[in-house]
Amino acid sequence: MTRSGFPHVPPAPPGAARPPEHAPDEAEVSEVEVAGPGPDDAHRFPCPACGSDLRFAPAAGKLICDHCGYEDQVEIPPGAAPQAIRELDFRAAIEARLPEVEMEETRVTTCTSCGAQIEFDDDTHARECPFCASPVVVDSGVHRHIKPRGLLPFGLTERNAHDAMSDWLGGLWFAPNGLKDYARKGRKMQGIYVPYWTFDADTQSDYRGQRGTVYWVTRTVMRDGKPTQQRVQKIRWRPVAGRVGRFFDDVLVLASNTLPRKYTDALEPWDLSAMEPYTPEFLAGFRAEGYQVGLEEGFLVAREKMDAQIQRDVRFDIGGDRQRIDDIRTRISGVTFKHVLLPVWLAAYKYRGKTYRFVVNGRTGRVQGERPWSAIKIALAVIVGLIVAAAAGYIGAR
């Protein structure tokens, strides 16, 4: 794994010819095949008219058949209106007391290259990982886990995602032209539903601290042998104590280790108010990754986010010009959670022996990824900078 969290692709063997950077071609910049859902994947919905696979079309918000043009609405189960996406009790889940209806068993295989948890159906035995294209052999065992409660359906088509990624690459300084040109050719992207946890909690926090009030004093100092008046800032501190309360709603935590958190965090914000109750039809034509971050581990990350907000609340409550926090003791109650799926378009390209991956928010088009650098462009920029600096120095010396 690279430091960014993406799988590392070994460079070309010593002595292998490297094509010149100023004339990139298909051999220099190549696509990493991201395996898409095939006929043996889970979440198949046969077309009632011709038998081909239906897929969910983000632009239409329907299931459509590319073979015969048949269209069908996504049916939301009775009683599963968006407002009915209820939370599950955290303590009951930790103590394995969730109702059986909230659990499911699927065949989830761990990719040995990037660690992705990939779901396959019973007829699949060998596939490629959709995150890094490494071959995987499907595990014959089953994995028991918490069902998704809701998801945000894809709102952008693959074409929309390509346009967003091309615009993002075009705005990068010192990115190789070959990669930009190749990305604009409309190569395959993979739509993947990425797992997240959301947490709700009620908190009451008692704190002790100090409120600082800024004031100024004038003192006389000697400067160049002469007395000079100087204003000096001082802070008067006094002890304070109090209590702040906050209800946290839908604290979002990534439940995957496959993609770097700094990239998925940068895809936020997500409009969770538009979430739909989970129904498999939304997954037609896409993949869903199984969660790798367990519920308890996810809650620890959520607590870090809550604690940071509580500290901001405490500082606001202390008031004054400056604040010091000596102690915060938080009581947390009513913790609930949901397992949800959020849409991401994923692309992978290989440039000079290294794989670069880009992720696009499947609702807003926000893009993040691991960027390449053009050594020639950087060298030219350095040379130009040195020339400009030398010219400025020469003119200044005249």
Image (cartoon, rainbow, N blue to C red):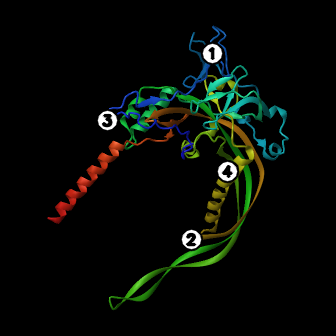
Mark 1 and mark 3 in contact (Cβ < 8 Å)? Answer: no
Q: How many other residues sit within 10 Å of disc 2, few (<14), some (14-19) or many (≥20)?
A: some
Q: How many other residues sit within 10 Å of disc 4, few (<14), some (14-19) or many (≥20)?
A: some
Local secondary structure at mark 2:
strand
The answer to which quarter of the image holds residue 65 is top right
Tell me which label, 4 or 2, sits earlier in the chain.
Answer: 4
The residue to which callout 2 is attached is: 322
Q: Nearer the viewer, mark 3 or mark 2?
A: 3
Q: Nearer the viewer, mark 3 or mark 1?
A: 3
Q: Which mark is residue 301?
A: 4
Left or right, 331 with respect to 284, comes to: right
Coordinates of residue 92 in the picture (x, y in percent): 83, 44
Local secondary structure at mark 4:
helix
In the picture, the quarter occupied by the N terminus is top right
Mark 4 and mark 1 in contact (Cβ < 8 Å)? Answer: no
Left or right, 301 with respect to 383, comes to: right
Under mark 2, the amino acid is Arg
Q: Whole-Å distance between the Cαs marked 1 and 4?
A: 39 Å
Residue closer to the observer: 162 or 372: 372
Q: Nearer the viewer, mark 4 or mark 3?
A: 3
Tell me which label, 4 or 3, sits earlier in the chain.
Answer: 3
Q: Whole-Å distance between the Cαs marked 4 and 2?
A: 28 Å
Residue closer to the observer: 233 or 178: 178
Q: Which mark is residue 163?
A: none
Q: Nearer the viewer, mark 4 or mark 2?
A: 4
Tell me which label, 3 or 2, sits earlier in the chain.
Answer: 3
Residue extending farthest to the front is 15
Q: Whole-Å distance between the Cαs marked 3 and 2?
A: 55 Å
The residue to which callout 1 is attached is: 53
